[in-house]
Image (cartoon, coloured by chain):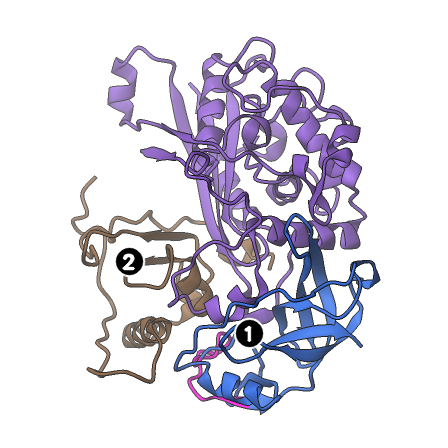
Protein backbone atom coordinates (compact mmCIF):
# COMPACT_ATOMS: atom_id res chain seq x y z
CA UNK A 1 0.00 0.00 0.00
CA UNK A 2 1.55 3.31 -1.02
CA UNK A 3 0.75 5.59 1.87
CA UNK A 4 -0.45 8.98 1.00
CA UNK A 5 -1.91 9.20 -2.44
CA UNK A 6 -3.88 12.39 -2.76
CA UNK A 7 -5.35 13.04 0.66
CA UNK A 8 -6.41 16.68 0.88
CA UNK A 9 -4.64 18.35 3.76
CA UNK A 10 -6.50 20.86 5.89
CA UNK A 11 -4.54 24.14 5.86
CA UNK A 12 -3.14 25.26 9.20
CA UNK A 13 -4.58 28.35 10.88
CA UNK A 14 -2.04 31.17 10.43
CA UNK A 15 -1.47 33.14 13.62
CA UNK A 16 0.79 35.88 14.92
CA UNK A 17 2.93 33.15 16.50
CA UNK A 18 3.40 31.00 13.41
CA UNK A 19 3.30 33.24 10.35
CA UNK A 20 7.10 33.41 10.10
CA UNK A 21 7.24 29.62 10.10
CA UNK A 22 4.72 29.24 7.31
CA UNK A 23 6.23 32.03 5.19
CA UNK A 24 9.52 30.11 5.35
CA UNK A 25 7.68 26.88 4.59
CA UNK A 26 6.37 28.45 1.37
CA UNK A 27 10.02 28.96 0.45
CA UNK A 28 10.89 25.38 1.35
CA UNK A 29 12.71 26.31 4.57
CA UNK A 30 12.07 24.41 7.80
CA UNK A 31 12.49 26.54 10.92
CA UNK A 32 12.33 25.54 14.57
CA UNK A 33 11.90 27.81 17.60
CA UNK A 34 14.92 28.14 19.89
CA UNK A 35 14.99 30.15 23.09
CA UNK A 36 17.84 32.66 23.20
CA UNK A 37 17.89 32.56 27.01
CA UNK A 38 18.15 28.80 27.66
CA UNK A 39 19.17 27.72 24.14
CA UNK A 40 16.66 24.87 23.98
CA UNK A 41 14.54 24.11 20.97
CA UNK A 42 10.90 23.24 21.62
CA UNK A 43 7.83 22.02 19.72
CA UNK A 44 5.07 22.99 19.04
CA UNK A 45 6.30 26.58 18.47
CA UNK A 46 5.31 29.25 20.94
CA UNK A 47 6.30 32.88 21.51
CA UNK A 48 7.16 31.98 25.12
CA UNK A 49 9.69 29.26 25.88
CA UNK A 50 7.94 26.33 27.59
CA UNK A 51 11.14 25.48 29.49
CA UNK A 52 12.33 28.78 30.94
CA UNK A 53 9.38 31.09 30.09
CA UNK A 54 11.78 33.35 28.22
CA UNK A 55 10.08 35.62 25.71
CA UNK A 56 12.97 36.00 23.28
CA UNK A 57 12.40 32.95 21.14
CA UNK A 58 13.91 33.03 17.67
CA UNK A 59 13.46 30.94 14.57
CA UNK A 60 16.46 28.97 13.37
CA UNK A 61 16.98 26.76 10.35
CA UNK A 62 16.45 23.09 11.23
CA UNK A 63 18.34 20.23 9.61
CA UNK A 64 15.17 18.49 8.45
CA UNK A 65 16.34 15.17 9.87
CA UNK A 66 14.77 12.98 12.52
CA UNK A 67 13.90 9.48 13.68
CA UNK A 68 10.48 7.93 14.15
CA UNK A 69 9.49 7.83 17.86
CA UNK A 70 6.19 6.12 17.16
CA UNK A 71 3.63 5.82 14.37
CA UNK A 72 0.38 4.20 13.38
CA UNK A 73 -1.13 3.34 10.03
CA UNK A 74 -4.65 4.75 9.92
CA UNK A 75 -6.53 2.06 8.03
CA UNK A 76 -10.22 2.49 8.63
CA UNK A 77 -10.53 5.45 6.24
CA UNK A 78 -10.93 5.93 2.51
CA UNK A 79 -7.26 6.86 1.99
CA UNK A 80 -4.96 5.23 4.58
CA UNK A 81 -2.20 7.42 5.95
CA UNK A 82 0.53 7.26 8.58
CA UNK A 83 0.42 9.42 11.73
CA UNK A 84 3.69 9.68 13.63
CA UNK A 85 5.72 11.46 16.24
CA UNK A 86 9.22 12.21 14.87
CA UNK A 87 12.16 13.20 17.07
CA UNK A 88 14.12 15.93 15.33
CA UNK A 89 17.92 16.07 15.29
CA UNK A 90 17.62 19.31 17.30
CA UNK A 91 15.86 17.48 20.14
CA UNK A 92 12.10 18.02 20.25
CA UNK A 93 9.56 15.45 19.00
CA UNK A 94 6.83 16.64 16.66
CA UNK A 95 3.52 15.27 15.41
CA UNK A 96 3.54 14.66 11.67
CA UNK A 97 2.76 12.20 8.88
CA UNK A 98 5.10 9.77 7.12
CA UNK A 99 4.77 9.85 3.36
CA UNK A 100 6.26 8.46 0.17
CA UNK A 101 6.64 4.89 1.34
CA UNK A 102 4.68 1.71 1.90
CA UNK A 103 3.19 1.14 5.32
CA UNK A 104 5.14 -2.04 5.92
CA UNK A 105 8.46 -0.20 5.47
CA UNK A 106 7.95 2.04 8.50
CA UNK A 107 9.69 1.26 11.82
CA UNK A 108 10.18 2.97 15.15
CA UNK A 109 13.75 4.30 15.21
CA UNK A 110 13.84 4.71 11.43
CA UNK A 111 15.73 7.78 10.14
CA UNK A 112 13.50 10.13 8.19
CA UNK A 113 13.95 13.34 6.28
CA UNK A 114 11.73 16.37 5.83
CA UNK A 115 9.38 16.85 2.91
CA UNK A 116 6.94 19.74 2.71
CA UNK A 117 3.43 18.80 1.59
CA UNK A 118 0.96 21.24 0.08
CA UNK A 119 -2.26 21.93 1.92
CA UNK A 120 -5.60 22.75 0.38
CA UNK A 121 -5.43 26.54 -0.02
CA UNK A 122 -2.77 27.11 2.62
CA UNK A 123 1.01 26.95 3.09
CA UNK A 124 2.85 23.62 2.97
CA UNK A 125 3.29 21.66 6.19
CA UNK A 126 6.30 19.60 7.29
CA UNK A 127 6.05 15.84 6.87
CA UNK A 128 8.73 13.16 6.67
CA UNK A 129 9.78 10.32 4.41
CA UNK A 130 12.28 7.49 4.91
CA UNK A 131 15.83 8.86 4.70
CA UNK B 1 -17.15 24.75 54.19
CA UNK B 2 -16.32 28.46 54.31
CA UNK B 3 -13.73 30.21 52.16
CA UNK B 4 -13.19 32.78 54.89
CA UNK B 5 -9.53 33.08 55.73
CA UNK B 6 -8.60 30.06 53.63
CA UNK B 7 -7.28 31.75 50.50
CA UNK B 8 -5.20 34.83 49.77
CA UNK B 9 -4.60 36.65 46.48
CA UNK B 10 -0.82 36.97 46.33
CA UNK B 11 -0.19 38.06 42.76
CA UNK B 12 -1.98 40.18 40.18
CA UNK B 13 -1.27 41.37 36.66
CA UNK B 14 -3.11 43.33 34.01
CA UNK B 15 -1.82 43.12 30.45
CA UNK B 16 -0.68 46.58 29.30
CA UNK B 17 -1.91 46.07 25.73
CA UNK B 18 -5.30 47.34 24.64
CA UNK B 19 -4.88 46.26 21.01
CA UNK B 20 -2.81 43.13 20.34
CA UNK B 21 -2.94 42.03 16.70
CA UNK B 22 0.52 40.44 16.92
CA UNK B 23 -0.23 38.10 19.77
CA UNK B 24 -2.32 34.98 19.92
CA UNK B 25 -4.97 34.44 22.58
CA UNK B 26 -2.88 31.64 24.09
CA UNK B 27 0.08 33.98 24.32
CA UNK B 28 -1.97 36.63 26.11
CA UNK B 29 -3.17 34.06 28.67
CA UNK B 30 0.42 32.97 29.23
CA UNK B 31 1.75 36.52 29.52
CA UNK B 32 -0.75 37.52 32.17
CA UNK B 33 -0.17 34.28 34.04
CA UNK B 34 3.57 34.86 34.12
CA UNK B 35 3.02 38.49 35.11
CA UNK B 36 0.89 37.54 38.11
CA UNK B 37 3.35 34.84 39.16
CA UNK B 38 6.18 37.34 39.00
CA UNK B 39 4.14 39.79 41.05
CA UNK B 40 3.72 37.10 43.71
CA UNK B 41 7.39 36.17 43.58
CA UNK B 42 6.52 32.65 42.37
CA UNK B 43 7.34 30.61 39.27
CA UNK B 44 5.53 28.04 37.14
CA UNK B 45 7.13 25.28 39.25
CA UNK B 46 5.07 26.52 42.20
CA UNK B 47 1.80 26.13 40.34
CA UNK B 48 -0.39 23.14 41.29
CA UNK B 49 -3.72 24.23 39.86
CA UNK B 50 -5.01 26.19 36.90
CA UNK B 51 -8.46 27.62 36.22
CA UNK B 52 -9.82 29.33 33.18
CA UNK B 53 -13.05 30.06 31.41
CA UNK B 54 -14.46 29.85 27.88
CA UNK B 55 -12.16 32.63 26.65
CA UNK B 56 -9.13 30.36 27.00
CA UNK B 57 -8.53 28.32 23.86
CA UNK B 58 -9.91 24.92 24.64
CA UNK B 59 -12.03 22.97 25.23
CA UNK B 60 -11.11 23.04 28.89
CA UNK B 61 -7.77 24.03 30.39
CA UNK B 62 -5.53 21.32 28.89
CA UNK B 63 -4.29 23.34 25.91
CA UNK B 64 -3.20 26.24 28.12
CA UNK B 65 -1.66 23.86 30.63
CA UNK B 66 0.51 22.52 27.83
CA UNK B 67 1.28 25.90 26.28
CA UNK B 68 2.65 27.08 29.63
CA UNK B 69 4.17 23.67 30.40
CA UNK B 70 2.52 23.45 33.81
CA UNK B 71 2.68 20.43 36.10
CA UNK B 72 -0.85 20.38 37.48
CA UNK B 73 -2.61 18.53 40.27
CA UNK B 74 -5.90 20.26 39.61
CA UNK B 75 -7.53 22.13 36.79
CA UNK B 76 -11.01 23.28 35.95
CA UNK B 77 -12.93 25.44 33.56
CA UNK B 78 -16.27 27.15 34.08
CA UNK B 79 -18.26 29.03 31.48
CA UNK B 80 -21.02 31.36 32.70
CA UNK B 81 -20.40 34.30 30.38
CA UNK B 82 -17.54 35.78 32.38
CA UNK B 83 -14.71 34.18 34.34
CA UNK B 84 -16.19 33.08 37.68
CA UNK B 85 -13.42 34.47 39.82
CA UNK B 86 -15.52 33.96 42.94
CA UNK B 87 -15.81 30.22 42.27
CA UNK B 88 -12.16 29.46 41.82
CA UNK B 89 -10.80 30.04 45.34
CA UNK B 90 -12.64 26.88 46.44
CA UNK B 91 -9.90 24.62 45.14
CA UNK B 92 -8.72 21.62 47.14
CA UNK B 93 -6.11 22.24 49.83
CA UNK B 94 -2.47 21.37 49.13
CA UNK B 95 -1.64 17.89 50.28
CA UNK B 96 1.33 17.15 52.48
CA UNK B 97 3.43 14.81 50.39
CA UNK B 98 6.68 15.03 48.55
CA UNK B 99 5.54 16.49 45.25
CA UNK B 100 8.88 15.89 43.55
CA UNK B 101 8.60 12.16 44.17
CA UNK B 102 5.42 12.07 42.08
CA UNK B 103 6.90 13.43 38.87
CA UNK B 104 7.80 10.41 36.78
CA UNK B 105 7.95 12.38 33.58
CA UNK C 1 -23.18 15.65 39.15
CA UNK C 2 -24.49 14.64 35.78
CA UNK C 3 -23.04 13.41 32.53
CA UNK C 4 -25.04 12.73 29.37
CA UNK C 5 -24.85 12.88 25.61
CA UNK C 6 -25.94 11.40 22.30
CA UNK C 7 -22.91 10.80 20.12
CA UNK C 8 -24.39 7.59 18.72
CA UNK C 9 -27.75 8.93 17.56
CA UNK C 10 -26.07 12.15 16.39
CA UNK C 11 -24.02 10.03 14.03
CA UNK C 12 -20.64 10.89 15.44
CA UNK C 13 -17.62 9.69 13.52
CA UNK C 14 -16.29 6.63 15.25
CA UNK C 15 -12.99 8.02 16.48
CA UNK C 16 -11.58 7.67 12.98
CA UNK C 17 -12.16 11.24 11.85
CA UNK C 18 -10.49 14.31 13.37
CA UNK C 19 -12.78 16.18 15.76
CA UNK C 20 -13.57 19.87 15.34
CA UNK C 21 -11.29 22.18 17.32
CA UNK C 22 -11.31 25.71 18.62
CA UNK C 23 -9.07 27.48 16.06
CA UNK C 24 -7.43 29.46 18.85
CA UNK C 25 -6.05 26.31 20.42
CA UNK C 26 -2.31 26.93 20.32
CA UNK C 27 -1.57 23.38 19.19
CA UNK C 28 -4.15 23.40 16.38
CA UNK C 29 -1.94 24.55 13.45
CA UNK C 30 0.59 21.87 14.38
CA UNK C 31 -1.85 18.96 14.68
CA UNK C 32 -4.90 19.51 12.48
CA UNK C 33 -3.12 19.02 9.11
CA UNK C 34 -1.94 15.57 10.17
CA UNK C 35 -5.40 14.18 10.93
CA UNK C 36 -4.68 12.82 14.39
CA UNK C 37 -7.84 11.08 15.58
CA UNK C 38 -8.87 9.41 18.80
CA UNK C 39 -8.09 5.96 17.43
CA UNK C 40 -4.75 6.61 15.72
CA UNK C 41 -3.44 8.60 18.69
CA UNK C 42 -4.04 5.79 21.18
CA UNK C 43 -2.68 3.42 18.56
CA UNK C 44 0.63 5.34 18.56
CA UNK C 45 0.87 4.79 22.32
CA UNK C 46 0.25 1.08 21.82
CA UNK C 47 2.97 0.92 19.14
CA UNK C 48 5.50 2.57 21.44
CA UNK C 49 4.50 0.36 24.38
CA UNK C 50 5.00 -2.73 22.22
CA UNK C 51 8.36 -1.42 21.03
CA UNK C 52 9.68 -0.64 24.53
CA UNK C 53 8.19 -3.53 26.47
CA UNK C 54 7.29 -6.25 24.01
CA UNK C 55 3.57 -5.97 24.72
CA UNK C 56 1.63 -8.09 22.23
CA UNK C 57 -1.69 -7.81 20.43
CA UNK C 58 -2.82 -10.94 22.26
CA UNK C 59 -2.18 -9.24 25.60
CA UNK C 60 -4.15 -6.17 24.50
CA UNK C 61 -6.97 -8.49 23.42
CA UNK C 62 -7.22 -10.02 26.92
CA UNK C 63 -8.52 -6.70 28.23
CA UNK C 64 -11.49 -6.87 25.86
CA UNK C 65 -11.99 -10.59 26.55
CA UNK C 66 -12.24 -9.93 30.29
CA UNK C 67 -14.71 -7.07 29.83
CA UNK C 68 -16.89 -9.29 27.62
CA UNK C 69 -17.05 -11.99 30.29
CA UNK C 70 -18.60 -9.35 32.54
CA UNK C 71 -20.83 -7.70 29.94
CA UNK C 72 -22.72 -10.90 29.28
CA UNK C 73 -24.42 -10.48 32.66
CA UNK C 74 -25.46 -6.87 31.94
CA UNK C 75 -28.88 -6.61 30.23
CA UNK C 76 -28.11 -3.05 29.09
CA UNK C 77 -24.67 -3.77 27.61
CA UNK C 78 -24.21 -2.74 23.98
CA UNK C 79 -21.94 -5.72 23.26
CA UNK C 80 -22.94 -8.57 25.57
CA UNK C 81 -21.33 -11.50 23.74
CA UNK C 82 -18.25 -13.16 25.14
CA UNK C 83 -15.29 -12.86 22.75
CA UNK C 84 -11.96 -14.69 22.53
CA UNK C 85 -8.46 -13.36 21.89
CA UNK C 86 -8.80 -14.72 18.37
CA UNK C 87 -12.06 -12.80 17.84
CA UNK C 88 -10.27 -9.57 18.76
CA UNK C 89 -7.30 -10.23 16.48
CA UNK C 90 -9.64 -11.16 13.62
CA UNK C 91 -11.64 -7.94 13.90
CA UNK C 92 -10.64 -5.30 11.34
CA UNK C 93 -7.57 -3.15 12.03
CA UNK C 94 -8.62 0.43 12.73
CA UNK C 95 -5.16 1.97 13.23
CA UNK C 96 -2.18 -0.31 13.75
CA UNK C 97 -2.02 -2.11 16.13
CA UNK C 98 -5.59 -1.54 17.36
CA UNK C 99 -8.38 -3.73 16.02
CA UNK C 100 -12.03 -2.79 16.19
CA UNK C 101 -12.53 -4.87 19.33
CA UNK C 102 -9.65 -3.01 21.02
CA UNK C 103 -11.85 0.12 20.89
CA UNK C 104 -14.72 1.13 23.17
CA UNK C 105 -18.33 1.59 22.07
CA UNK C 106 -19.93 4.89 21.13
CA UNK C 107 -23.17 5.10 23.10
CA UNK C 108 -25.86 7.56 24.07
CA UNK C 109 -26.96 7.89 27.64
CA UNK C 110 -25.26 9.11 30.78
CA UNK C 111 -25.24 8.84 34.53
CA UNK C 112 -25.18 10.88 37.72
CA UNK C 113 -24.02 10.75 41.29
CA UNK C 114 -25.13 12.65 44.37
CA UNK C 115 -22.52 13.67 46.88
CA UNK C 116 -23.54 14.48 50.46
CA UNK C 117 -21.96 15.45 53.71
CA UNK C 118 -21.26 12.65 56.24
CA UNK C 119 -24.11 13.61 58.56
CA UNK C 120 -26.59 13.45 55.69
CA UNK C 121 -25.22 10.12 54.38
CA UNK C 122 -25.77 8.52 57.76
CA UNK C 123 -29.41 9.58 57.81
CA UNK C 124 -30.23 8.16 54.36
CA UNK C 125 -30.36 4.45 55.20
CA UNK C 126 -28.30 3.54 52.09
CA UNK C 127 -25.00 1.65 52.16
CA UNK C 128 -22.25 4.02 53.22
CA UNK C 129 -19.72 4.57 50.42
CA UNK C 130 -17.04 7.04 51.41
CA UNK C 131 -14.40 8.77 49.27
CA UNK C 132 -11.05 8.34 50.98
CA UNK C 133 -8.53 9.50 48.39
CA UNK C 134 -8.39 11.41 45.13
CA UNK C 135 -5.71 12.47 42.69
CA UNK C 136 -5.69 14.47 39.49
CA UNK C 137 -3.10 15.28 36.88
CA UNK C 138 -2.76 16.70 33.41
CA UNK C 139 -0.18 15.19 31.09
CA UNK C 140 0.82 16.82 27.82
CA UNK C 141 3.76 16.96 25.45
CA UNK C 142 5.89 19.17 27.73
CA UNK C 143 7.43 21.30 25.00
CA UNK C 144 8.38 18.35 22.80
CA UNK C 145 10.15 15.88 25.14
CA UNK C 146 7.80 13.16 26.38
CA UNK C 147 7.24 9.46 27.07
CA UNK C 148 4.07 8.05 25.54
CA UNK C 149 4.20 4.81 27.55
CA UNK C 150 3.22 6.68 30.73
CA UNK C 151 -0.19 8.25 31.45
CA UNK C 152 -1.31 10.87 33.96
CA UNK C 153 -2.27 8.04 36.32
CA UNK C 154 1.42 7.87 37.25
CA UNK C 155 0.87 11.13 39.10
CA UNK C 156 -2.83 10.99 40.02
CA UNK C 157 -2.63 7.44 41.38
CA UNK C 158 0.10 7.95 44.00
CA UNK C 159 -1.70 11.08 45.24
CA UNK C 160 -4.93 9.15 45.74
CA UNK C 161 -3.20 6.18 47.40
CA UNK C 162 -1.23 8.47 49.72
CA UNK C 163 -4.35 10.30 50.80
CA UNK C 164 -6.31 7.07 51.28
CA UNK C 165 -3.46 5.40 53.16
CA UNK C 166 -3.79 2.17 51.12
CA UNK C 167 -1.81 0.50 48.33
CA UNK C 168 -2.75 -1.08 45.02
CA UNK C 169 -2.46 -4.51 46.63
CA UNK C 170 -5.36 -3.60 48.97
CA UNK C 171 -7.82 -2.81 46.16
CA UNK C 172 -10.58 -5.41 45.80
CA UNK C 173 -12.18 -4.00 42.62
CA UNK C 174 -11.00 -1.48 40.04
CA UNK C 175 -12.91 0.43 37.37
CA UNK C 176 -10.21 1.32 34.86
CA UNK C 177 -10.96 3.73 32.02
CA UNK C 178 -11.18 1.55 28.93
CA UNK C 179 -11.43 3.82 25.89
CA UNK C 180 -9.01 1.32 24.31
CA UNK C 181 -7.31 -1.82 25.53
CA UNK C 182 -3.93 -0.04 25.64
CA UNK C 183 -5.39 2.63 27.94
CA UNK C 184 -6.14 -0.06 30.53
CA UNK C 185 -2.68 -1.62 30.37
CA UNK C 186 -0.91 1.72 30.77
CA UNK C 187 -3.11 2.84 33.67
CA UNK C 188 -2.71 -0.46 35.56
CA UNK C 189 1.07 -0.01 35.40
CA UNK C 190 0.93 3.68 36.35
CA UNK C 191 -1.36 2.95 39.31
CA UNK C 192 1.10 0.38 40.61
CA UNK C 193 -0.90 -2.82 40.09
CA UNK C 194 2.19 -4.10 38.25
CA UNK C 195 5.57 -2.64 37.24
CA UNK C 196 5.85 -0.31 34.22
CA UNK C 197 6.04 -2.46 31.13
CA UNK C 198 4.52 -5.54 32.77
CA UNK C 199 0.92 -4.58 32.04
CA UNK C 200 0.57 -6.96 29.11
CA UNK C 201 1.56 -9.93 31.24
CA UNK C 202 -0.66 -8.70 34.09
CA UNK C 203 -3.87 -8.66 32.04
CA UNK C 204 -3.24 -11.92 30.20
CA UNK C 205 -4.96 -15.22 30.89
CA UNK C 206 -8.06 -13.72 32.48
CA UNK C 207 -6.39 -11.90 35.36
CA UNK C 208 -9.03 -9.14 35.15
CA UNK C 209 -12.04 -11.50 35.22
CA UNK C 210 -14.12 -11.52 38.40
CA UNK C 211 -13.92 -14.87 40.14
CA UNK C 212 -11.00 -15.94 37.95
CA UNK C 213 -8.17 -13.40 38.17
CA UNK C 214 -6.43 -11.29 40.77
CA UNK C 215 -7.98 -7.92 39.88
CA UNK C 216 -11.66 -7.90 38.91
CA UNK C 217 -12.18 -4.91 36.61
CA UNK C 218 -15.08 -3.20 34.85
CA UNK C 219 -17.64 -5.73 35.96
CA UNK C 220 -20.40 -3.86 34.12
CA UNK C 221 -18.59 -4.63 30.87
CA UNK C 222 -16.83 -1.27 30.75
CA UNK C 223 -16.59 1.07 27.81
CA UNK C 224 -15.27 -1.82 25.77
CA UNK C 225 -18.52 -3.78 25.96
CA UNK C 226 -21.23 -1.94 27.91
CA UNK C 227 -21.40 1.85 27.83
CA UNK C 228 -19.20 4.91 27.16
CA UNK C 229 -21.89 7.61 27.12
CA UNK C 230 -21.11 10.95 25.49
CA UNK C 231 -17.62 9.55 24.83
CA UNK C 232 -16.83 10.15 28.50
CA UNK C 233 -16.45 6.91 30.39
CA UNK C 234 -15.63 8.14 33.88
CA UNK C 235 -19.17 8.32 35.27
CA UNK C 236 -19.84 4.67 34.47
CA UNK C 237 -16.52 3.75 36.12
CA UNK C 238 -17.65 5.41 39.37
CA UNK C 239 -21.13 3.87 39.17
CA UNK C 240 -19.86 0.28 38.93
CA UNK C 241 -17.34 0.84 41.72
CA UNK C 242 -20.18 2.04 43.96
CA UNK C 243 -22.34 -0.94 42.99
CA UNK C 244 -19.49 -3.28 43.92
CA UNK C 245 -18.94 -1.56 47.27
CA UNK C 246 -22.67 -1.74 48.05
CA UNK C 247 -22.88 -5.41 47.04
CA UNK C 248 -25.29 -4.43 44.24
CA UNK C 249 -23.30 -5.67 41.23
CA UNK C 250 -24.64 -8.69 39.32
CA UNK C 251 -24.15 -11.79 41.50
CA UNK C 252 -22.09 -13.47 38.79
CA UNK C 253 -19.49 -10.68 38.97
CA UNK C 254 -19.89 -9.36 42.53
CA UNK C 255 -16.56 -9.38 44.36
CA UNK C 256 -16.86 -10.95 47.83
CA UNK C 257 -16.38 -8.52 50.72
CA UNK C 258 -15.75 -5.68 48.35
CA UNK C 259 -14.95 -2.94 50.79
CA UNK C 260 -12.20 -1.04 48.92
CA UNK C 261 -12.46 0.07 45.30
CA UNK C 262 -10.71 2.35 42.87
CA UNK C 263 -12.03 4.26 39.85
CA UNK C 264 -9.63 5.67 37.28
CA UNK C 265 -10.34 8.03 34.40
CA UNK C 266 -8.30 9.29 31.46
CA UNK C 267 -9.80 12.05 29.31
CA UNK C 268 -8.78 13.36 25.83
CA UNK C 269 -5.76 11.86 24.15
CA UNK C 270 -2.87 9.82 25.52
CA UNK C 271 -0.75 10.70 22.47
CA UNK C 272 -1.00 14.47 23.05
CA UNK C 273 -2.75 15.81 26.15
CA UNK C 274 -5.11 14.29 28.68
CA UNK C 275 -6.51 14.66 32.16
CA UNK C 276 -6.24 11.83 34.63
CA UNK C 277 -8.20 11.26 37.82
CA UNK C 278 -8.08 8.56 40.49
CA UNK C 279 -10.66 8.04 43.19
CA UNK C 280 -10.47 5.49 46.00
CA UNK C 281 -13.65 4.63 47.91
CA UNK C 282 -14.45 2.36 50.82
CA UNK C 283 -17.58 0.90 52.27
CA UNK C 284 -17.98 1.87 55.89
Magenta-colored stretch includes residue C181: no
Which chain hosts label 2? B
Image quadrant of residue C185?
top right
- Identify the residue position indicated by label 2 in the image: B54
Q: CA distance from mark 2 to mark 1?
A: 30 Å
Image quadrant of residue A3?
bottom right
The local secondary structure at tag 2 comes to loop
Image quadrant holding the N terminus of chain C, namely: top left
Q: Chain A hue? A: blue
Q: Residue at the location (71% across, 24% down)?
A: C83
Q: Which residues are magenta?
A: A47-59
Rendered image: mark on residue B11: none
Tell if the residue under mark 2 belongs to the same chain as the one under mark 1: no
CB-based contact (under 8 Å), mark 2 and mark 1 = no
Residue C31: in sight, yes or no?
no
Q: Residue at the location (25% across, 22% down)?
A: C119
Q: Is residue C271 left or right of residue B58?
A: right
- Identify the residue position indicated by label 1 in the image: A119
Q: Nearer the viewer, residue C27 or C262?
A: C27
Q: Residue at the location (60% across, 48% down)?
A: C39
Q: Which chain is purple?
A: C
Q: Chain B hue? A: brown
Q: Is residue B42 left or right of residue B7?
A: right
Where residue C234 sits in the image (x, y, percent)? 46, 36
Which chain hosts label 1? A
Amino acid sequence: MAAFASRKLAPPVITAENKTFFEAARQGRFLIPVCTACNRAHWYPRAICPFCAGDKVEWRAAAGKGTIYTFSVMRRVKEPYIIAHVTLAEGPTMLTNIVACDAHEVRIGQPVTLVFQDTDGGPPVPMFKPA
Amino acid sequence: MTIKGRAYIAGIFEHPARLAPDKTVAQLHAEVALGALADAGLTRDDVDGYFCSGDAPGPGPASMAEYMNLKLRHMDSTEIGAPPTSHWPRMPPKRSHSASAMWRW
Amino acid sequence: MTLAGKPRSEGMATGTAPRARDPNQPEAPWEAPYAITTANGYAMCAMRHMYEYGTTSEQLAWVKVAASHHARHNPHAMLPEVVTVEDVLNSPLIADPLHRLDCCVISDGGGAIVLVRPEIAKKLKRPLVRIIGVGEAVKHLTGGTFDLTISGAARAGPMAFAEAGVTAADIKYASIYDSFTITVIMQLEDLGFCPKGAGGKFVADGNLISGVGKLPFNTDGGGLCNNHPANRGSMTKVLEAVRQLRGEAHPAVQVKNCDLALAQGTGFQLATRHGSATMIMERE
